[in-house]
Image: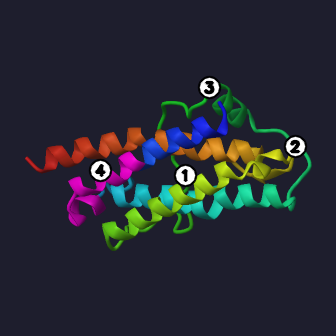
C-alpha cells in the first residue's frame, strides 16, 4: 500500500474517533469497564501519546539518519505487516504508570491531540524524502522498522483499537440502561 492510501485510511479512522467524541459525557469517556481495563479516554490517550512520542518520533529519527542501517522485524512484526493489520486479539501491556495512560481531563484536549496527529501525518506523507531512507528505528515490540513501516503502523494501530472501543461502547450501553 502506498503512503497516500495509508494517509487517506488513517484520516478516515482518526476523523471517526473525533466524531465519536460527541457521543460521550466526560463521565462516560473516563469510566472503566473494570479495574484492569482502560476507559475510552485512556485508550484515546494511548493512541495519541504512542503516536506523538514514539511512532512519529521514530519516523523523524529514520528520516534524519540518526538510527540503524539494518535489522529485522520481530516475528509478530513480520506477521502484522504481512497481514496489514494487528491480530484480532486483546493485547495487554504491563500495568505500570509508564504504560497505563491517565484519563484525560477533558474531551477537547483529546480532539486537539488527534487533530495534531492528522496534521503531522499529512506533512509526513507530503514529504517524500522521509520515506527514501533505509534507516530503521528499533523498539522492543517490533524490533527494526523503517519510516514507511512506522507510518503504516500508526494507521494499523488506530484500526486495532476500534475493537476495544466497540467493547467499551457495549459496556457503556449496558450501564446506561
Residue shown at the point (34%, 69%) measured from the top left: 108
Query: Disc number at residue 20?
Result: 4
Circle nearer the viewer, 4 or 3: 4
Q: Is residue 45 left or right of residue 156?
A: left
Number of on-image labels: 4
- Give the secondary structure at mark 4: helix
- Colour treatment of the image: rainbow
Circle nearer the viewer, 2 or 1: 2
Q: Are marks 1 and 3 in contact (CB under 8 Å)?
A: no
Q: Is residue 134 left or right of residue 54?
A: right
Q: Are marks 2 and 1 in contact (CB under 8 Å)?
A: no
Mark 4 residue crowding within 10 angstroms, few (<14) / some (14–19) / many (20+):
few
Circle nearer the viewer, 1 or 3: 3
Residue shown at the point (73%, 33%) measured from the top left: 75
Is residue 166 shown above or below 116? above
Name the outermost residue toward the right. Answer: 69
Query: Disc number at residue 93?
Result: 1
Q: Which residue is mark 3?
A: 83
Locate residue 106, reporting x and y percent.
Answer: 32, 71
- Give the secondary structure at mark 1: loop
Magenta-highlighted stretch: main secondary structure?
helix
Q: Are marks 4 and 1 in contact (CB under 8 Å)?
A: no
Residue shown at the point (83%, 46%) measured from the top left: 132
Is residue 109 shown above or below 82? below
Q: Which residue is mark 2?
A: 71
Circle nearer the viewer, 4 or 1: 4
Amino acid at each position: 500500500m502506498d503512503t497516500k492510501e495509508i494517509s487517506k485510511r488513517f484520516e478516515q479512522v482518526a476523523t471517526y474517533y473525533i466524531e465519536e467524541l460527541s457521543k460521550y459525557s466526560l463521565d462516560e469517556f473516563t469510566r472503566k469497564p473494570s479495574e484492569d481495563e482502560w476507559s475510552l479516554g485512556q485508550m484515546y490517550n494511548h493512541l495519541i501519546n504512542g503516536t506523538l512520542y514514539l511512532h512519529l518520533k521514530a519516523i523523524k529519527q529514520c528520516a534524519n539518519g540518526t538510527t540503524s542501517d539494518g535489522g529485522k522485524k520481530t516475528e509478530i512484526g513480520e506477521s502484522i505487516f504481512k497481514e496489514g493489520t494487528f491480530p484480532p486479539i486483546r493485547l495487554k501491556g504491563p500495568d505500570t504508570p509508564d504504560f497505563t495512560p491517565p484519563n484525560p481531563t477533558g474531551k477537547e484536549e483529546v480532539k486537539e491531540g488527534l487533530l495534531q496527529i492528522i496534521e503531522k501525518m499529512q506533512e509526513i506523507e507530503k514529504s517524500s524524502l522521509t520515506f527514501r531512507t533505509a534507516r530503521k528505528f528499533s523498539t522492543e515490540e517490533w524490533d527494526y522498522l523503517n519510516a514507511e513501516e512506522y507510518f503504516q503502523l500508526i494507521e494499523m494501530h488506530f484500526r486495532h483499537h476500534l475493537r476495544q472501543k466497540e467493547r467499551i461502547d457495549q459496556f457503556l450501553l449496558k450501564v446506561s440502561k
